[in-house]
Amino acid sequence: MRRNVLSSVLISSSSINKESRLEKMMNRWYGIKVGVLVILLLLLSSVVFHQIFENYVPYDTFAFSGTRGDEEVFFLKSTETIEKLESFGINKKGYLNRLEQVEKLLFQEGYVVKYIDEKELAALPRDSVLFALDTISLSNNSVKDIENYVSEGGFLVFNYHFAYNSKSGFRDDEVIRRITGLKSTKKNNHILSKEGMFLIPRILSPITQNIIPFTKRVELYTVDPLPVFISDKGLEPDMKLSNWTLSSPPLIKGNMEASSEQAGAIWHGGYKKGNWTYISFPSYSLFSIEEAVPTFRTILGSIVEYASKTATPISYPYIDVKKVVLVSEDTEYKYSSFKNFINAAEKYKIPVSAYCVSSLAEKEEYLPLMKMAAKSPFIEIGSHSHSHKKILGTSVENIRLEVKKSKEIIDQISQRKITGFRPPREELDDAMINELIDAGYSYVLEKNKGYLYPHEEHEGLYIIPRTATDDYQYLVSLEWGQDEIVQRMIFETEFITSLDGIYSLSVHTHLMAYKNNIEMLEKYFEYVSKNSKLTALTGQGLIDKVKKREQISYDIKQTAKNFLINVKNKNIDSLEKLSFRVFWTKPIQIENVRSEIRGIGVTYKNNLKARFTDITISIINPLSSLNLIAEYSLQ
């Protein structure tokens, strides 16, 4: 009995021990599986987190983002330049005073300047901005240090005859060409200041965008001939030089007019991992003319601001087209010539604007012409006053007649609500402006204003500047043949549109639209119709694009693999083929751009040499935001 009990106990104990060992093994295996599962989940989550981080988490979400500090900039106080100046018998104070003057301009823009000499170049932080102004002499070692600084990510701002000299000899523009890739033409290598010079800003530029479109062209003072550089690598100047006329570049050696290509005065571009801005004039030009100082101060600040960002997005000036021309007619004396203008526009399918004198437009003999124009899809009708008599300084009643009554008459004749006004003799004052706004005009085509892009100069009223040479100058003041005039019109078109400005040509019924003079306009229309880069717009068509551009904004954030681009359309209309350009301060190549909303197409085109990408969105809805994901790689 005892034996059986003991046996059963032993058997039971043995069974328990076996179950305990099995249970331990099972628990151990279960623990291993759980551990493996946890590890797999951690790995999977880390992969997912990594993907999210790379694709959707902007660098500036975290404190370790490593953005460029843009409050401090470095100035090279070049000992080697001072020694070269002294060898020429020139006191160093002039050079040092210039640096101090530019330092003051930057200080006013919120930047602190730290001076360094050549010995400190090699140790400069590669995410900094270095100004090397008026540095006419550098040793080979210093040049090498500066080139290394830029190639490894630095931002160099330099000017004029940079490093033309060394102790061992004369280099000419060798270093400038090497860093910038710009070329100088040795035959005509300097622009002269014989008739004075002005700077005209490019509209589609990260350096001049802060002064566009409200600043007129900037007067430039220099007693030195300026070096001429051109680009065959897709680089476009941020500012060009002109002379006393807005549409012409100044003279070069030999008293020949410079070409549009030779007129570049401020450029920017990339060099390996870094960037540069080159200014072709000496630093004293930045503060020599009091009226120009605020603009130059803004430009200097904009250069540093641009240097502090990886990406700078800017809308195309005309939303969906690149270069725009506006041809208009003052429909006044020889009113019957209006027919020639209408026929030429319809023959070449060129949209134009006609500003009519209402006292003539309402005459029975001219009513058929007005109806003909009103039916044409290529003619916009506007007002050129009621009587074409002097308006400035007259009574309020007379101003109202010339401005408001003329609109009412032309509205009735054309069965349209006209919006454009062209003042006789290009005269405009506050009293006229008040009446124009009250009458419901949206824009005025005025005189040459010294700027190239329309803007709301008065609340509720946009001003379109006349940028082309008036046909009165061509046909009355100048003794030019027809072919010479046409070639000049084409030259001015190419010069002004190269800066993204509006080429606005104003002709008259008694001049270029009269008799066989219309042949000149037809030849110009033929040129426009064959040039795929040019788009002709009416005055109101132009203003519509300008207004829409003002209601677009961008925000770009960078992740490890993508740029997240948010586009806001604050217009009450949808926009088709919205184009904008993103300027990069790193050697970035966009690999793909897609919209987060299906059905919205996005196209893009890289310019690797000039470091920008053009992006076009097929459509963006009214009062909405659109997110784009742009994949990128570093070159």
Image: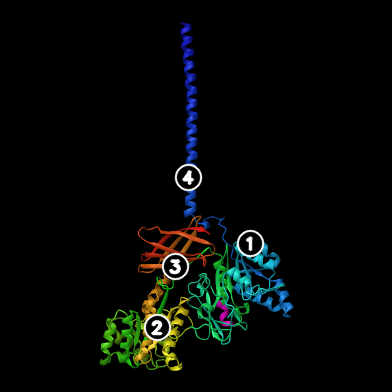
Q: Work out whether mark 2 precedes mark 1 in sequence or the reverse, and give the earlier one.
A: 1
Q: CA distance from mark 2 to mark 4?
A: 62 Å
Residue in front for this viewpoint, 31 or 222 = 222
Q: CA distance from mark 3 to mark 1?
A: 32 Å
- Identify the residue position indicated by label 3 in the image: 580
Q: Amino acid at mark 2?
A: Val
* Contact flag, marks 4 and 1 (Cβ < 8 Å): no
Depicted 564 relative to depicted 475: above or below: above
Q: Work out whether mark 3 precedes mark 1 in sequence or the reverse, and give the earlier one.
A: 1
Q: Which one is in front in this view, the residue at disc 3 or the one at disc 4?
A: 3
Sort mark 3 into few (<14), some (14-19) or many (20+) by Cα contacts within 10 Å.
Answer: many
Label 2 SS:
strand
- Identify the residue position indicated by label 4 in the image: 45
Task: Considering the whole magenta stretch, tell me its main secondary structure.
Answer: helix
Using the rendered view, name the quadrant where residue 425 is placed: bottom left
Q: Amino acid at mark 3?
A: Phe
Depicted 571 relative to depicted 419: above or below: above
Q: Which mark is residue 125?
A: 1
Q: Amino acid at mark 1?
A: Pro
Q: CA distance from mark 2 to mark 1?
A: 51 Å
Q: Give how far across and how far down residue 169 sits, in percent.
A: 70, 74
- Identify the residue position indicated by label 2 in the image: 444
Label 3 SS:
strand
Q: Which residues are magenta?
A: 289-295
Sort mark 2 into few (<14), some (14-19) or many (20+) by Cα contacts within 10 Å.
Answer: many
Q: Residue furthest front?
A: 187
Q: Give how far across and how far down residue 153 sits, in percent.
A: 59, 62
